[in-house]
Amino acid sequence: MSGLFAICGRFGDVMMSVPSIQRLSIDHPGELDILVASRYSSCIELLRAVDAPVRRVVSEQTMCPMRDGIVTGMFMSSWSEKLLRNRYPGYDRYYNAAPNMAPRGAHMMSLIAYRCGVVSSLAELPVVEVPKKSVSNGKMVVHLGSSDPNRLVCLPHNPFPEVESVCIGLPVDPCPVWVDSDKRSEGFEIAVEELRGASLMVGSDSLFSHVSCLMGIPTLCIHTSSRGCISYSREAYPTGRSMVADRGLSDPIAVRKTLLQPSRQEISDARSDRQEQERMDVHPKTG
């Protein structure tokens, strides 16, 4: 069984499609290719970094400049399965999960999942599978930039001075003066490698805070608007946290406090441990 998953959005949209891809790979075992806009074909590096069950990336060359100037790949949301079959024949299944105009209050991850049949309503978030990761003896990775200038974040002081800090991203992205290491210009491969060794991640509403969440890293995403926080909250991920900072100026104390709150995964793990202990108390092992 083979499938083509169309998600012609920006890198962040591709990352938010991973939970849906995970679910589809279970419900319909086989090879799954992902169709993206040609400028984002390098997403294969990121998909591999988070162990997404994708065979290969297919690049769509045709763009609609007027619509893509607003939201990249938006034109694909109007494509039918018949059109996808005509343009990309040979697959058994086709999923058009390209983001469309989302109703106010809907999470983009839910919209993607709803469009490809993973969830039954926009009020439902897909299950996200992430690896368990140790949070000790690591470092904090920081990324405060974004392709959208309205999402840039300022973090004037170090919220976790007790751990090593490194900044990733593009050379044009902001870098706090207090970071220990600046690796903004070293590309995706180095950025992903830094994330692999991280115990914490603090970022803007952009690509890398999605990637770190999918890696199972405790992550805080700093949003610059309440609406953006609702639509792209990282709390959709088991280890994700979100907060809103007015005009992008974030309070380091609030950052620390928010990130140190137990995550959904930690709460779930604690509940499982407690239930297992209760089961053992009721049915103790005998020698």
Image (cartoon, grey):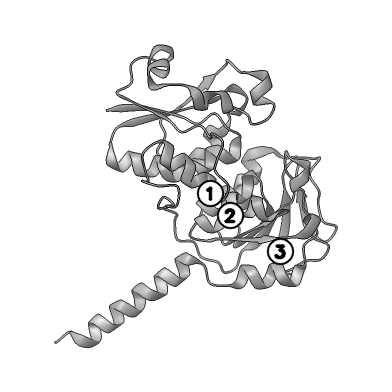
Residue at figure coordinates x 65%, y 50% from the top left: 228
Residue furthest to the front in view is 104
Question: Which one is nearer the viewer's eye here, 42 or 62?
Answer: 62
Tag 1: residue type? His
Q: Is residue 57 above or below residue 162?
A: above
Question: Which one is nearer the viewer's eye here, 14 or 166?
Answer: 14
Q: Is residue 148 above or below residue 176?
A: above
Residue 2 x, y percent position in the rendering = 31, 26
Element under label 2?
A: loop
Task: Report the side of 244 relative to 231 (left or right).
Answer: right
The residue that label 3 is drawn on is 164
The residue that label 1 is drawn on is 107
Is residue 52 visible in the rendered image? The answer is no
**Label 1, label 2: how far apart the Cα atoms are:** 8 Å
Q: Quadrant of residue 102?
A: top right
Residue 44 x, y percent position in the rendering = 52, 33
Q: Earlier in the sequence, mark 1 or mark 2?
A: 1
The residue that label 2 is drawn on is 233
Do the residues under discs 1 and 2 have CB atoms within 8 angstroms? yes
Bin the neighbour count of mark 3 within 10 Å (Cα to Cα): few under 14, some 14-19, many 20 and up: some
Q: Is residue 26 above or below residue 4?
A: below
Quarter placement of the C terminus: bottom left
Task: Report the side of 180 relative to 85 (left or right).
Answer: right
Residue at figure coordinates x 63%, y 47% from the top left: 208
Quarter placement of the N terminus: top left
Q: Which of pointers 1 and 3 indicates the residue nearer the eye?
A: 1
Tag 2: residue type? Ser
Element under label 1?
A: loop
Element under label 3?
A: strand
